[in-house]
Image: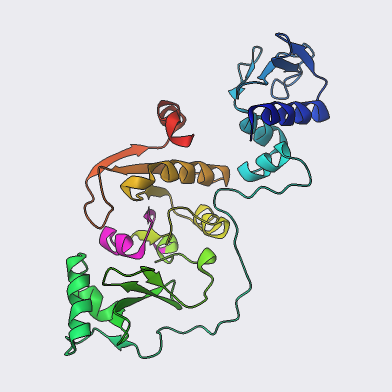
Amino acid sequence: MTYISRIRTIDNWLSSHFDVIYTGSGKDARINCPFCGVDTGQHLYVELNGNRAHCFRCDWVGTHISLIMQYSKCAYYEAINQLKDSTVTVRPFYEDKSNTYTVTKVAHPPGYVSLRDRPNSMEGRAVLNYLRKRGISMDYIRHHMGYVPGTMRAWIIVDVNWYQGRSVVDSKPRYVSPKWPKDDSLWNSKALYLCSYVIICEGVFSSIHAGNVAVGLCSKTATYQQLRRIARSPVKSITIMLDASAYREAVVLALALRNEAYNGKLYIHSLYSGDPCDSLSGDTHEFTLKYLIAHRFATK
């Protein structure tokens, strides 16, 4: 959104909902504050060339988006859509890519060989060695993982009924899977209902390394379906532990959970480098308004 279009869109939204007075050579707009109770003096100032709104009567402070969200009682992405032209639909950061899938649910790919017993083939041993180097315990490998001869991939179940293969050599793509409803699936989603505290990770291996309380997005960002599943679960505390290169995504995910009315405790675990598979060392911060203001750069 350009500088000029942002002015026009917030101005259009204000004028369609309030009587507007312009001040500061047209740089600011004044409206009756909808949060004061009764305000007839148009005490709420909205910056047109900035992104701040402030009521000098009740001291309400927020951004253009928070003003729309609170006034319209809507979610973040719905507020974004209100700022845009009515003919344009803007998806949230966790873009909804849902499709209708008719694939038969199967637990394993064709030719799957379990790693329950020590494999005799060279490929089986290569897969086993790769998994052990990634820090996966033998007990977990025996019960949950296997390989398909000729693929050079470790295969693992995701969300009970779907499988995914991770290359154990330097080949692309790293992950392959059948056509499955990935946007609506979470690794170890049962933890959302069995645990009062969960950790949100990016991938399957990070989740396994983080323990039984870890849930995997299989991506840096969450889809709307995944976000809704997390926000509506009975979990009382969530720690977001994405890769070190995904700090901004962690902040945006925390914001989106709040916008979806998740009321539990939220924490962001900042890794120094790598991902949770490499090390769980880092700093954990409770995600609050004070934290967000102090780290405002992360949401830009």
Please tell me whether residue 247 belongs to the stretch shown in magenta. Answer: no
Q: Is 198 covered by the magenta stretch?
A: yes
Name the side, left or right, on which 206 lies relative to 45: left
Instruction: Say if residue 212 shows up in the picture.
Output: no
Residue 113 horizontal/vertical position (percent): 29, 88
Q: Residue furthest top?
A: 24
Residue 147 vs residue 34, the one in the foreground:
147
154 and 114: which is toward the camera: 154
Residue drawn at x 66%, y 40% is 80
**Number of numbered callouts drawn:** 0
Query: Relative to 51, is 168 on the left or the right?
Result: left
Q: Which is nearer the eye, 73 or 129? A: 129
Magenta stretch, residue numbers: 194-211
What is the residue that sits farthest to the front in this orientation?
Answer: 171
Give 103 or 292, whichever is nearer the viewer: 103
Residue drawn at (22%, 84%), measured in percent from left and top? 124
Residue 260 spot, x, y in % from top left: 57, 47
| Residue 148 visible in image | yes
Q: Please state the horizontal and vertical placement of residue 166, each as a whole percent of the image.
A: 33, 71
